[in-house]
Amino acid sequence: MHADLLDILRCPYCGSRLDLVRSLFHRADGDTISDGVLGCECCVFPIVDGIPVLHLHPAAVTARGHLEAGKPDLALRAMVGLDGENEAEQFEAAAASSDSTFKDIVAALGPRFEAGYFLYRFSDPTFVVADAVVRAVAGTVLRGGGRALDICGGSGHLTRALVPLSSPAPVLADLFFPKIWLARRFTAPGAVPVCCDGNSPLPFVRGAFDFAMCADAFMFIWTKRQFVGEMCRAVDGAARATVLINHTHNQLVWSPSHGQALTPSAYRNLFEGVQPRVLAESRLFAGVVKGDGLDLGYTDELEALNREAALTLIASTVSDVFAVHPIQSPKPSGGEWRINPLYQVREETGLIRATLHFPSPDYEDEYRACREYLPDEVSIDAAALKALQDGGSPESMWEWVRRRVVVELPRKYC
Ligand SMILES: [Zn+2]
């Protein structure tokens, strides 16, 4: 981490400024700190492999002990959550190789880490709508500059969209250290990772950000009232202060991995004094998939919201946010254009024939809405795909990009 991050970090418990404890073991190159211990007025926190860990869960306490003993490698093992020697060596070998992909390192982290479908994340229906909302809202709010926070951002799949929009660089915060570690290397290089607990006060100074978001995670936060208060505090005083909560489940409608969801009116009341816009995700999804645009200005009636599986909440001082945003083709963010990994591919002379193939019946069931944009069979002009991959913009490819048959994946993703 760069030492200037200390200007916006604060202890989550006493609120005081944090500084590197120079009398304890640390490694730094100029203003870049890779390992060490941060101290405030009430406690001490580790910096592990360049990532500040601002909570007191057992792994963080163990890691701090290893750092004080001058053993940064063991501190990293503790934060990654590898107990066995074999597991740890597998991870360290994969991490040390510059050829390793995101998929290789996920495999080395073992089955406990990612049971899910990260390979298909860039085309799943939740992502497709959330990505469009993030680009529209953050793109509007941060037009003249400003900093973004993605709290509970996991492996950074949506933070990736914030990297070109946020200046200074966006902060990606999450409790799960290996996820933000992977994000820094693969999915959201350029974002600044901070490890912290969303159920505690956020470790940032008031008004450090202009835009704060939380996607696909709010229903898993227990301290929701505090969390919303903390997101509002993080942007307090900013001229274009905006809080976005994407894809939070509705207590009234069952969904897989339901979490501790609230009703639409309870979500609205959490903001106390600010009137957030509560939007129906299925309506936003339809606008994105049909290419009609993303209507963030529409007022969804409470009865309609009560029937929704998932909701989007926006509190913003920027009136331009609450408008119809045209659907833009996904913009390249330094990755590479590939055929969506959900397709099985065979090549014929000059043509790529791709067939949709779900990894499991569970995936097909949970994400069946992707059939609204992913066709069963497609034939793609191989030369046009090659031109796109070489930096051109062949018109025939944009339909496939818009429909997520061709996706931009981070480099060395799989
Ligand atoms: Zn403190």
Image: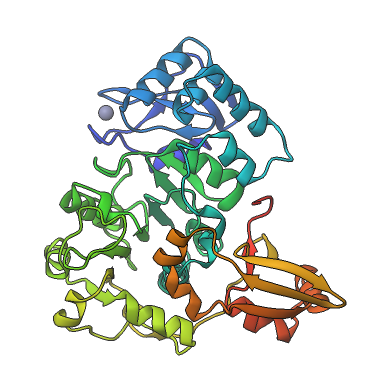
| Closest to the observer, 351 or 318 | 351
Which residue is at the far top? Answer: 69
| Residue 260 locus on image (x, y percent) | 20, 53
Q: Residue at x 28, y 72 (%)?
A: 317
Q: Residue at x 61, y 46 (%)?
A: 103
Way the structure is coloured: rainbow
Q: Residue at x 33, y 33 (%)?
A: 17
Which residue is at the far front? Answer: 361
| Closest to the observer, 322 or 147 | 322
Q: Quadrant of residue 402?
A: bottom right
Kindly tell me whether residue 23 is visible in this rendering. no
Q: Give the image quadrant in which the ligand numbered 1 is located.
A: top left
| Closest to the observer, 241 or 220 | 220
| Residue 141 locus on image (x, y percent) | 40, 70
Q: Is residue 27 left or right of residue 352?
A: left
Q: Quadrant of residue 148?
A: bottom left
Which residue is at the far right? Answer: 349
Q: Residue at x 32, y 37 (%)?
A: 10
| Residue 43 locus on image (x, y percent) | 29, 22
Q: Note whether 8 is above or below 391 in the view shown.
A: above
| Closest to the observer, 366 or 96 | 366
Kindly tell me whether residue 370 is visible in this rendering. yes
Q: Is residue 53 left or right of residue 183?
A: left
Q: Note whether 99 is above or below 129 in the view shown.
A: above
Label count reads 0
| Residue 412 locus on image (x, y percent) | 68, 50
Q: Quadrant of residue 56?
A: top left
